[in-house]
Amino acid sequence: MKKLLLMAFLATAVASAQQGGAAPQSQALKSQAKVLTRAEFDGLFAKPDQILIIDVRRPDEIKDIGGFPVYLNVQISDLERSLAWIPRDRTIITVSNHAGRGGHAADILTKNGFKVAGTIGAQTYEKDGGKLTKIVAPPPAATATAEKKTPQ
């Protein structure tokens, strides 16, 4: 009976390992970046001449959720191609909705020699009592073009 139980246990362990029983991919890709608290972010944000906020969200996310009043928007997929024009004389804070993509961006920047304070999630910041700036989209270009074509 003991042999039967041992064989069943081993078969289960082998099947689990073959199906990816190891750590999930999200754990394997965990960022090394510090996730900033609201207080830490506010302390850094109080010195705007010393920081650069890089928001890696899509423009529609920034418009729908809100963001910080001054930032550089570089989507995560474009970050490595954009390193040459990102200023190196400031401490960088990366932003995404919940600090996931922001953490990945912070890792990329750190690996490339930038000074990174950490990352923060805009939605997390707001949930913790922080105030986000709501972005109002400009009117469609067609409206402005139609007004210019009005006969005089």
Image (cartoon, grey):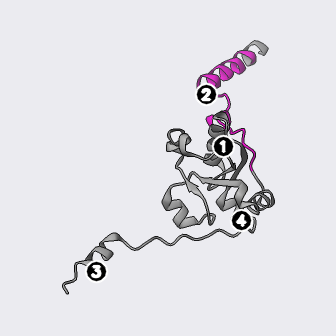
Looking at this view, is 113 or 25 the one in front?
A: 113
Q: Earlier in the sequence, mark 2 or mark 1?
A: 2
The earlier-in-sequence mark between 3 and 2 is 2
What secondary structure is marked by label 1?
Answer: helix
Q: Is residue 57 above or below residue 6?
A: below
Q: Amino acid at mark 3?
A: Glu
Tell me the kind of residue under disc 4.
Lys
Q: Position of residue 4 (x, y in %)?
A: 72, 15
* Residue identifier under label 1: 106
Mark positioned earlier in the residue sequence (1 or 4): 1
* Quadrant hosting residue 42: bottom right
Question: What residue lies at 69% left-to-right and 66% top-to-bottom?
Answer: 126
Cα separation, mark 2 vs mark 1, equals: 28 Å
Q: Element type at marker 3?
A: helix
Q: Secondary structure at mark 2?
A: loop
Question: What's the residue type where badge 2 is placed?
Answer: Gly
Residue 122 position (above or below residue 18): below
Please state the extent of the stretch shown in magenta in the rendering: 6-35
Name the residue tied to disc 4. Answer: 127
* Percent of width and height locating residue 98: 65, 54
Instruction: Single out the mark in the foreground, 2 or 1.
Output: 1
Q: Judge depth for marks 2 and 4 and give the one in front.
A: 4
| Left/right of residue 75 with respect to residue 103 in the rendered view | left
Write down the residue under mark 3.
147
Is 130 colored magenta in this rendering? no
Q: Residue 102 in the image: state x and y as whole percent.
A: 63, 48
Q: Do the residues bearing badges 3 and 2 touch, measured as CB atoms within 8 Å? A: no
Q: Earlier in the sequence, mark 2 or mark 4?
A: 2
Q: 116 or 66: nearer the eye? A: 116
* Of pointers 4 and 3, the one earlier in the residue sequence: 4
